[in-house]
Image (cartoon, rainbow, N blue to C red):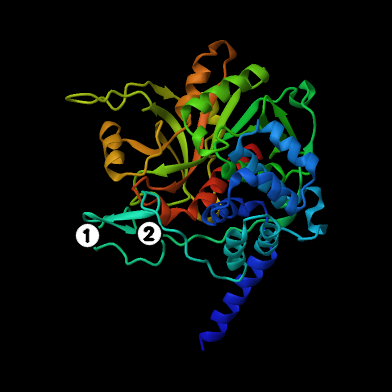
Amino acid sequence: MSFIPTLLLFSLQLIYLAEGLNIRDLDNVIQNLEDAQFNTADWDKLGRKLGLHKNTLDVISVNERGDVDRCFTECLVKWLSRADDVDSKCNGKPSYSSLADALDQMKNNKHQADYIRGLSRGKKPAKRRKLDPASTKKCGSEYKYNDGESEACAADEETDGPPQDLPDWQYDDKIINRVPETQEFHKDLVKDIEILLMPATTSEEDLVVYYLKKSSKKVIETYIDGLRIYIGHYGKSKVIVVMTAPDKSRQGPIHAGVITSKMLEKFLRIKYVVAVGVCFGMDPGKQKLGDVIISGTICDFTNKREGLGENEYQRGPQHQVKPAILNKFRPTHGFEMPHNITVSTGVLISTGSLIDNPDVKKKLLDQKPDAIAGEMEGAGIMTAIDYAPERGVSAIVIKGIGDWGDGDKEATKKWKPFAARAAAHYVYAVLNK
């Protein structure tokens, strides 16, 4: 009796894979093209085959200063956002099937096209195996590939908390497909705006922009010194949105601090800076994936001593979040988040490294046992603000728990968009009250 529901579910999966992709699929599309070993340097050729105008691709190249990874990502953003009326072009609307057709029309991309076409048919071809921490798990003294087909690690492998079922949080396709209006930057666009929202990665930015597009008012996309800026209403407040890490090489406090400083120089009315995105949780016994963490204190672990003898793992300051911004973004009495998401305020550890090792995490907790989460941008943002005391700017970190920093990020990978959305939703709810 279970055969029919199973067949129906499989059929629906095939329809989705073949017929529909949109901006919320960006991370998966990028990952699948990487798995297919697509050469990102050919992003402009792919863009033309997907139906994007040459002028659009030229603008991407100029705005992203020729950075291949950023151009590749922005090209896919435009395609998934249905820019240049790509639905009407020869390969049709965004789908894995149309992506495979575009790859087929490029030279030396048959393998890549076959791989992507396999996705549109509901199967994933085998990837080339490589032995690195991202694709393996350590079982005792041996490494085993973590490709979904290998045997599970031995029972003595530690896991950080029980598995969670990912809630079904629906999106509104009309909001997703709404395209911001592109304009040349001028000062009147940001006149009197006091709030700067700073997601770190593209996937975090996508969720912030989703809530920006919920407003019936105009959403503007513009560029300043190569940085993409969104301007619009987030709930009842007008905000500026800028991403701090358009690719992995720019993640962390250095770039977050530099971009914060640049934004404060450009936007003289900014009073509140909010880092919105994903963090790692500390205690799966008391926390859940997707829970939202608000910084009351940000402990700077970017400056440490590593030498002979005893090491110092925190030499940086402890930034106390100012009461003005903490009160502004603290949950009000009776406030509830969807999907039983909990909102907590406490101590955040901010590091210069992506934490994915239980031993490293333990050392951090040994230094700061009251910490409830960790992330990578807060220390840089707080430092930038410290160097502009005359401005009276306040900053806060509001992020959703996307993993446990325990060496098994792959197991919680599907939670990252949910956690980013939880944080974006919370900030929207606060600014909409």
Left or right relative to 28: residue 161: left
Point out residue 427 in the picture as x, y percentages from the top left corner.
59, 39
In this rendered view, identify the residue nearer to me: 169 or 334: 169
Residue 170 to residue 366: above or below: below
The C terminus: image quadrant: top right
Amino acid type, callout 2: Asn
Point out residue 173 in the picture as x, y percentages from the top left corner.
71, 56
In space, the residues marked 1 and 2 are separated at their CA atoms by 17 Å
Residue at x-position 57% and y-position 27% = 273
Label drawn at residue 146: 2
Q: Quadrant of residue 141?
A: bottom left
- Residue 369 seen in this snapshot: no
Amino acid type, callout 1: Asp
Residue 358 to residue 272: above or below: below
Residue marked by disc 1:
156
Q: Quadrant of residue 296?
A: top left
In this rendered view, identify the residue nearer to me: 58 or 299: 58
Task: Tell me which numbered mark, 1 or 2, is placed earlier along the sequence.
Answer: 2
Label count reads: 2
Q: Residues within 10 Å of mark 2 (few under 14, many from 20)?
A: many
User: Considering the numbered disc 2 on the image, is that residue within a helix, a strand or a loop?
Assistant: loop
Residue at x-position 29% and y-position 45% = 358
- Residue 122 seen in this snapshot: yes
Residue at x-position 59% and y-position 42% = 202
In this rendered view, identify the residue nearer to me: 116 or 339: 116
Point out residue 4 in the picture as x, y percentages from the top left corner.
57, 85
Residue at x-position 41% and y-position 43% = 280
Point out residue 286 in the picture as x, y percentages from the top left corner.
35, 49
User: Considering the numbered disc 1 on the image, is that residue within a helix, a strand or a loop?
Assistant: loop
In this rendered view, identify the residue nearer to me: 260 or 38: 38
